[in-house]
Amino acid sequence: MADEWKLKEDGNLDISSLTGFRTVVIQDGAVVLQLKAATAAEHFPEGDKLEQFSLSPQTAAELGRDLLDAVEILLQKPAGEVH
């Protein structure tokens, strides 16, 4: 499942736009990540979907590194070029 993506019927990625996030460290040593998203344009700017995830410190660090790596790729591309 690690290599699979959720797709729409037309084959495009089924994505929502992130409208907010929060993190908190809880006593058992986990990081809780809350993501708020808009599943369609009419749900901006508040969002209509809320998900919460418990991450180990190692997973949280890996996620942070992966996000930074993705941003670096985008910042190195000329405007309009997609990776």
Image (cartoon, rainbow, N blue to C red):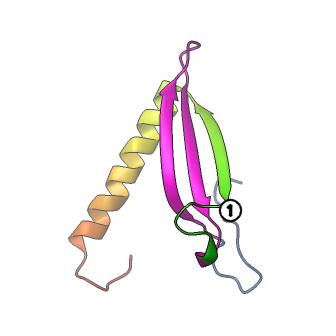
The residue indicated by pointer 1 is: 4
Up-down relation of residue 57 to residue 34 (above or below):
above
Residue drawn at point x = 70 percent, y = 82 percent: 11
In this view of the protein, which residue sits in the foreground, 63 or 26? Answer: 26
Up-down relation of residue 32 to residue 82 (above or below):
above
Q: Position of residue 34 (x, y in %)?
A: 57, 42
In this view of the protein, which residue sits in the foreground, 66 or 79? Answer: 79
Q: Position of residue 7 (x, y in %)?
A: 70, 73
> What is the tally of numbered marks visible in this picture?
1
In this view of the protein, which residue sits in the foreground, 54 or 47? Answer: 47
**The magenta stretch spans which residues?**
15-41
Q: Is residue 83 left or right of residue 33?
A: left
Residue drawn at point x = 77 percent, y = 82 percent: 9
Q: Position of residue 50 (x, y in %)?
A: 66, 50
Toward which corner of the image does residue 13 lie, by quadrant? bottom right
Q: Is residue 30 left or right of residue 12?
A: left
